[in-house]
Amino acid sequence: MKRRKFTAKFKTKVVLEALKERHSARELADRFKLSPQQISTWKREFLENADQVFGGNSKSKKSAEENKQDELLRMIGQQKVEIDFLKKNLM
């Protein structure tokens, strides 16, 4: 039996239906052809990471920008050391 892969869009649709609590997990499992445990797992993961929707992206972008800036500063420092070394050896 082949393992099924689900898109983020599908998972979100299932989780949002579960959060509405209009149907039981068993009913949703039958409707989407999943196990109730899978729905519970996706729901728990969604709720644990919900805070990233509003704050996580800008933080990770800032972190990537900071990492890039740190790398550039490290390169500048290394080049300065090399230039000073070459100047000293030319004199």
Image: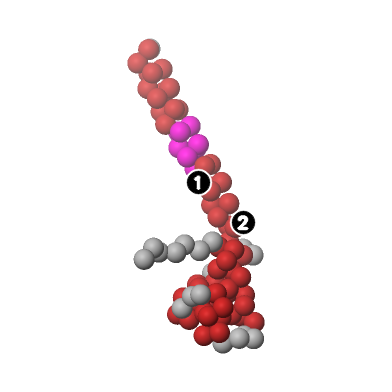
Quarter that holds the N terminus:
bottom left
Magenta span has 71? yes
When asked about the image quadrant of residue 15, the answer is: bottom right
Q: Crowdedness of circle 2 by 10 Å Cα count: few (<14), some, many (20+)? A: few
Marks counted in the figure total 2
| Residue 47 appears in the rendering | no
Q: Position of residue 69 (x, y in %)?
A: 53, 41
**Tag 1 residue:** 67
Q: How is the image coloured?
A: secondary structure
Residue located beneath label 2 in the image: 58
Q: Is residue 19 above or below residue 11?
A: below
Cα–Cα span, label 1 and label 2:
14 Å
In the rendered structure, the answer to whether residue 89 lies left or right of residue 39 reads: left
* Magenta stretch: helix, strand or loop mostly: helix
Left or right: 61 as drawn, with respect to 78: right
Q: Which mark is residue 48?
A: none
- Marks 1 and 2: which is nearer the front? 2
Which residue ends up furthest to the front in the rendered image? 1
Q: Position of residue 77 (x, y in %)?
A: 45, 33
Residue type for callout 2: Ser
Magenta residues? 70-77
Q: Nearer the viewer, residue 12 or 34?
A: 34
Q: Which residue lies most toward the top here?
A: 91
Which image quarter is the C terminus in? top left
Judging from the image, what secondary structure is the residue with disc 1 in? helix
Q: Amino acid at mark 1?
A: Asn
Q: Quadrant of residue 16?
A: bottom right
